[in-house]
Amino acid sequence: MTQRCGLVAVLGAPNAGKSTLVNALVGQKVAIVSPKAQTTRARLMGIAIEDQAQILLVDTPGIFAPRRRLDRAMVQAAWEGAEDADRVLLVIDAAAKVGARVEGVLEGVESRPEPRILVLNKVDLAEKEQLLVLAAGLAERLQPEAVFMVSATDGDGVADLKRHLASVMPEGPWHFPEDQLSDATDRMVAAELTREQLYLQLHAELPYASAVETEKWEDRKDGSTVIHQQILIERDSQKAIVLGKGGAKLKAIGAAARQAISEHLGRKVHLFLHVKVNPRWDEDRGLYRDIGLEWTD
């Protein structure tokens, strides 16, 4: 059979479930997920395989109205992720109303030349009548080549979507080895897995304005890896939240992150975390480079 390989840009508003959908299509976790909006910050490629097709899924940051430099860089990364894509996969939260954020995404997608596929996600949380009205209205407006109703969390409808994507990928050789699931480096994944634990364990207590930076990485002769990371926050008051009473919260975050990173690397990990207050951490060019974003003026 002839090999196929193509690029699919996954676009949508924050919290539409893009990362969860990419993970479901790949069949393994490649993107961090949390209930917090704007969890995804940089373009991350998940690599899915269906029969003879390799589907390169670009999980992009959610598109929203940017207010500061980091926001602008994230939104720019999202739209750039769609450039030269063979398909744009527009993910809409079917359980939420079409508000200003979703409207902004729809307007942006309407003007793009790439063929588009509409995915209504979280259908398990939506009322059926409301879902059908939403699907009909968006299909009429966007004229997609196909519409899919899925629950990325449960996996419902994901297999059908994956088969369709495989069928429309252009003929050509695979770009990555069969066992590669993502284009992210181990350093980037390690920082992301720690950031995921920050969001999961601190919930609404920690504002979106935080980052994780891998400072030091050492592969030891005994097969283990030593990783030093710093958690960057904006204010002293946030430091107490991250540390917790007697440092208990930071210890719990570190333990969970260490386990996740160890599972990803397939070896023992020694993880050391420290918290740094820097009101201008989002003005650090090096950090943008590390997380795969472009510096925007």
Image (spheres, rainbow, N blue to C red):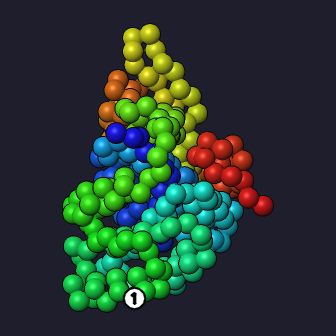
Q: Look at the picture and state if 159 lies above or below 11.
A: above
Q: Residues within 10 Å of mark 1 (few under 14, many from 20)?
A: few
Between residue 127 and residue 207, name the one nearer to us.
127
Which corner quadrant of the image does residue 225 belong to? top left
Q: Position of residue 169 (x, y in %)?
A: 44, 53
Which corner quadrant of the image does residue 181 belong to? top left
- At a point 66% along the width and 55% down the height, the residue shown is 282
- At a point 60% along the width and 56% down the height, the residue shown is 84
Q: Is residue 1 visible?
A: yes
Q: Is residue 249 left or right of residue 64?
A: left
Q: Look at the picture and state if 161 lies above or below 50.
A: below
Check the picture and name the quadrant holding the N terminus.
top left
Q: Is residue 105 left or right of residue 199?
A: right
Instruction: State the residue position of label 1.
Output: 137
Q: Is residue 237 visible?
A: no
Q: Position of residue 159 (x, y in %)?
A: 25, 57
Between residue 127 and residue 149, name the one nearer to us.
149
Check the picture and name the quadrant holding the C terminus.
bottom right
- At a point 32% along the width and 33% down the height, the residue shown is 263
Between residue 214 and residue 2, name the one nearer to us.
2
Q: Look at the picture and state if 283 lies above or below 145.
A: above
The furthest residue to the top = 221
The furthest residue to the right = 297
Between residue 118 and residue 23, name the one nearer to us.
118
- At a point 68% along the width and 52% down the height, the residue shown is 294
Secondary structure of the residue carrying tag 1 is helix
Amino acid tagged 1: Gly
Q: Position of residue 257 (x, y in %)?
A: 37, 40
